[in-house]
Image: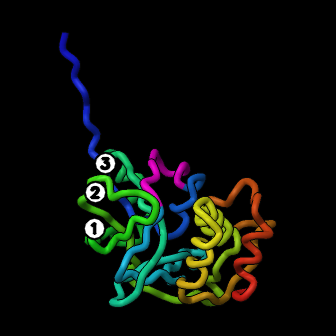
């Protein structure tokens, strides 16, 4: 008797915004969470403009760091993530810059991140949508409150935030915001 096993090649992506949220990732394709991380030499900020709003972006910056999560996706699912993140450039980051907080490295040799090619801050025509912030913070709260607070404290460019919870402009809003009071408490100093 012969058994053949197909070994799937996985791609590892550092997620620092909406992809941290498990519900949001399901909108794109299959993935598995590797765990929370902190990455050196990356700065997260509100700097990627879409047609109606500004979303999170990340750029290389010496001395900076960014918290988020590493996710594992089957290699064949990568085009779906590249399509979702089509406004960004996908680049490789050194695994030595990734600090795995709750898990061992698991033999990961390559980590990718989507970075902003042309950073622009939010303005009146491209505000930060509360519905998007809710998705992101809910994802960070999947780990712990302190991890979400670190997100708020280390993200640059907080300005021009609009409350669109009743009529979301973000294309993948939460069906239900279960932790509204905790999200609002985290944003108290920002809003």
Residue 174 as seen in the image, left or right of residue 151: right
Q: Nearer the viewer, mark 1 or mark 3?
A: 1
Q: CA distance from mark 2 to mark 3?
A: 9 Å
Circle 2 packing at 10 Å, graded few (<14), some (14-19), many (20+), is few
Question: How far across and how far down the image is residue 120, in percent?
Answer: 49, 88
Q: CA distance from mark 1 to mark 3?
A: 15 Å
Question: How far across and how far down the image is residue 95, in percent?
Answer: 28, 67
Quarter in which the C terminus is drawn: bottom right
* Residue 160 highlighted magenta (yes or no): no
Quarter in which the N terminus is drawn: top left
Q: In the rendered image, which residue does mark 1 sit on?
A: 95
Asked if the residue under mark 1 is in contact with the one under mark 2, i.e. CB atoms within 8 Å, the reply is yes
Question: How far across and how far down the image is residue 174, in percent?
Answer: 69, 58
Q: In the rendered image, which residue does mark 2 sit on?
A: 108
Q: Residue at x 75, y 70 (%)?
A: 182
Quarter of the figure with residue 184: bottom right
Please tell me how many numbered marks the rendered image carries. 3
Q: CA distance from mark 2 to mark 1?
A: 7 Å
Quarter of the figure with residue 173: bottom right
The answer to which of marks 2 and 1 sits earlier in the sequence is: 1
| Secondary element at tag 2 | loop
Q: Is residue 48 above or below residue 86?
A: below
Residue 84 visible to the viewer: no
Question: How far across and how far down the image is residue 116, in percent?
Answer: 41, 78
Q: In the rendered image, which residue does mark 3 sit on?
A: 10
| Secondary element at tag 3 | strand
Residue 89 visible to the viewer: yes
Q: Residue at x 42, y 60 (%)?
A: 70
In the rendered structure, which segment of residues is drawn in magenta? 25-35
Q: Is residue 69 above or below residue 75?
A: below
* Residue 34 highlighted magenta (yes or no): yes
The answer to which of marks 2 and 3 sits earlier in the sequence is: 3
């Amino acid at each position: 008797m012969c058994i053949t096993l197909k070994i799937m090649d996985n791609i590892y992506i550092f997620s620092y915004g909406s992809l941290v949220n498990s519900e949001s990732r399901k909108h794109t394709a299959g993935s598995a969470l590797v765990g929370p991380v902190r990455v050196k030499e990356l700065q997260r900020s509100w700097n990627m403009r879409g047609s109606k709003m500004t979303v999170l972006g990340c750029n290389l910056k010496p001395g900076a760091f960014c918290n988020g999560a590493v996710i594992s996706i089957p290699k064949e699912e990568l085009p779906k993530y590249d399509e979702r993140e089509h406004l960004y450039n996908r680049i490789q980051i050194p695994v030595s810059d990734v600090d795995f907080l709750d898990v061992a490295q698991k033999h990961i040799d390559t980590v990718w991140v989507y970075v902003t090619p042309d950073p622009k801050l939010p303005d009146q025509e491209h505000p930060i949508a509360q519905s998007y912030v809710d998705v992101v913070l809910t994802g960070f709260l999947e780990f712990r409150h302190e991890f979400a607070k670190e997100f708020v404290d280390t993200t640059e460019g907080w300005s021009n935030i609009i409350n669109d919870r009743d009529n979301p402009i973000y294309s993948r809003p939460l069906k239900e915001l279960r932790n509204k009071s905790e999200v609002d408490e985290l944003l108290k100093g920002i809003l």
